[in-house]
Amino acid sequence: MRHATASFEFSERVGRAVHLAVCGAVLVFLVAPMLVVIPLSFNAEPYFTFTEGMLRLDSDAYSLRWYRGVVEGAEWRLALVNSIVIGVAATAIATTLGVLAALGLANPAMPGRGFVTSLLISPMVTPIIISAAGMFFFYSKLGIAQTHLGVILAHAVFGTPFVVISVTATLVGFDQNLVKAGASLGGGPFLVFRRIQLPLIAPGVISGALFAFAASFDEVVAVLFLGGLQQRTVPRQMWTGIREEISPEILAVATFLVMLALILLGTVEWLRGRASTKPGNAD
Amino acid sequence: MARPLRGARLRAVALTLPLVAFVAVTFIAPLGSMLVRSFYEPHVADALPRTLAALRAWDGSSVPSEDTFRILATELRWLDEQRKLGAVATRVNRLESGMRSTIMDTADALSSAEPGSWREAMIARDPIWEEPSAWLAVRRAGERYTMRHYLNALDLDRDPSGNIVAQSPDRRIYLPLLLRTLGVSLAITIICLILGYPVAYLIANASPARSNLLLLLVLVPFWTSLLVRTTSWIVLLQNQGVVNDLLVAAGVIGEDGRLALVYNMVGTLVAMTQVLLPFMILPLYAVMRSISPTYLRAASSLGATFRQGFVRVYWPQSLPGVAAGSLLVFILSIGYYITPALVGGRTGQLISNMIAYHMQESLNWGLAAALGVILLVTVMSLYLVYNRLVGIERMRLS
């Protein structure tokens, strides 16, 4: 009996070790691409692999030349300005409309909620090539293809599902009595929203806005179909770079984008931590 | 009671309405516009109205009358003068290859002629005008409402008498591609499940601090730009890339035996699996977190081995997460475009890439739209299943 227990424990321990090894390998697989890009962006040579000098940690093997190329390149600068302008405008539209819609959907009196929710989420699950092709046909007819406005509207509608989902999540635990209390004390709907609801759902609003911004900042297909030379964004510029001749400048931009992702992720996680400890949340 | 309820309902609708209207105009209307394009083709019908009217009385197998020849020649000449002939010729050419040059040549030859017989002049210029197939192509290109893009997208064709027949096997393109896309998506879903399940299990059963750290490792790639991740796979997998260098250094392969890991199906599979893995891990984790560890302990105290306990107790409870994650990954991979376009080379392309090709290069927008509608219907049916099974409201972002 004792022998049997020992062998059971042994096989369990082996099983656990195998499990950990598999998980370690999968996590490396998930993260490795980002870890490789960052050091290679400092490569002094135009290669995409670690040179012997880099492996010896020879300081001559590292350089900032690709970063200089990006910073001094007029095309990259225009792309960055475009990405920011389009991203901010699309996020503003998506957030305003998304927050209002989420407030409406959270109301138990809302008719046809399931259908409306699926409709509002559909831009997120529709294959991007289909949305972009349809937008190309329709926006051309409206005369807003090849304009900033066209790209902004496309990115705004791609961003709205993120806002709706994340604001809805913060509203799930929202105590509706607070609104009634505010109203019974004489607050109008707008005052109640601004002073009571908005502060409580703020983490969800900001997370949703960050998601929408990140989605716009990474979107390339709608820009390919709807944007002209004047609407080139950072991802659009990277797309050309990857397709034509992949230069290490791309890795420098990629490193910048990884940093941006870390900042956005950090902010969202911080907000999530705050949201779960905030007052007025029923759970 | 009725009045305040109605007020609340009105307020809820009023709050939702702006976004519903916005989505309708910026998103649903474009999809509708694509749907219309997939079956409505006014171009040739508007360009050759009198020819098409004359061909309506034609039997489809003999050489058309002198009158029909004259009308077509007149319309072609007029279009040539208006510089609108190229677009018409291209559209007829899609139904019968060679017709583009035939039409352009014929219009050119007749530009200033006043022949005694148009029929003889045109046949002398290009004997194809004696074949019914040329005229059938003109007639079919002139159908204002047409199913031909769908037939084309499903590798079907019409024979001269109008029956729907399958394309000859060597000309079938789209159905095999659609099947390949479904096959690749299924493979990616299974790989993601096999890789993601143990990780989700580890995160769900770790201490809170460790679980948060591990979740961050899953979320970092989720937040990182898709283009960045795709770029890094090129860097890792290319011929002179990191993976091949490591394999050579380790002596697994020789310097001249470097593996082709990118710009083919391998590249598409590896990069898409990495990109979609978080979409598997997160729903799995959400379900596993709610499975109490006491069940497994109870099973083992009743004498079950770990494997028995896992198969009979844990796995069934984790099935909702398996379903949610698998459906999500499958839905996302069917419509994937960017990653295959960048790392798929010639052999690793999926149906979305074919739509992009017809949108941007062949400029056969009707066919692109029909393929798009077929893909959209596939994805939307799966989305409805997902909605039934998981509930879209329960979709979480973090």
Image (tube, coloured by chain):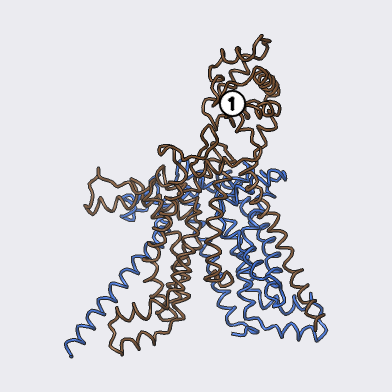
Chain colours: A blue, B brown
What is the quadrant of residue B22 in the picture? Answer: bottom right
Quadrant that contains the C terminus of chain A: bottom right
Q: Amino acid at mark 1?
A: Trp
- Residue B267 x/y as whole percent: 39, 50
**Chain name for mark 1:** B
Residue A60 in view of the camera: no
Pick whichever, A45 or B60, lies toward us.
B60
Nearer to us in this view, B348 or B131: B131
Q: Choose between A45 and B35: the one closer to the eye.
A: B35
| Above/below status of B139 relative to A142 | above
Relative image position of residue B4 (x, y in whole percent) = 80, 81
**Is B132 placed left or right of B178 in the picture?**
right
Using the image, determine if residue B240 lies above or below residue B91: below
Please give the name of the residue rendered at 56% of the width and 75% of the height, measured from the top-left corner.
Answer: A272
Residue farthest left in this picture = A3
Q: Residue placed at 65% from the left, 60% from the top?
A: A91
User: Helix, strand, or loop for circle 1?
Assistant: helix
Question: Along the line of sight, which residue is nearer the eye, B159 or B39?
Answer: B159
Residue A189 image position (x, y, % from top left): 79, 76
Q: Is residue B106 left or right of residue B50?
A: left
Q: Mark 1 — residue?
A: B135
At x 63% / y 47%, what residue is drawn?
A: B34
Quadrant the N terminus of chain A occupies: bottom left
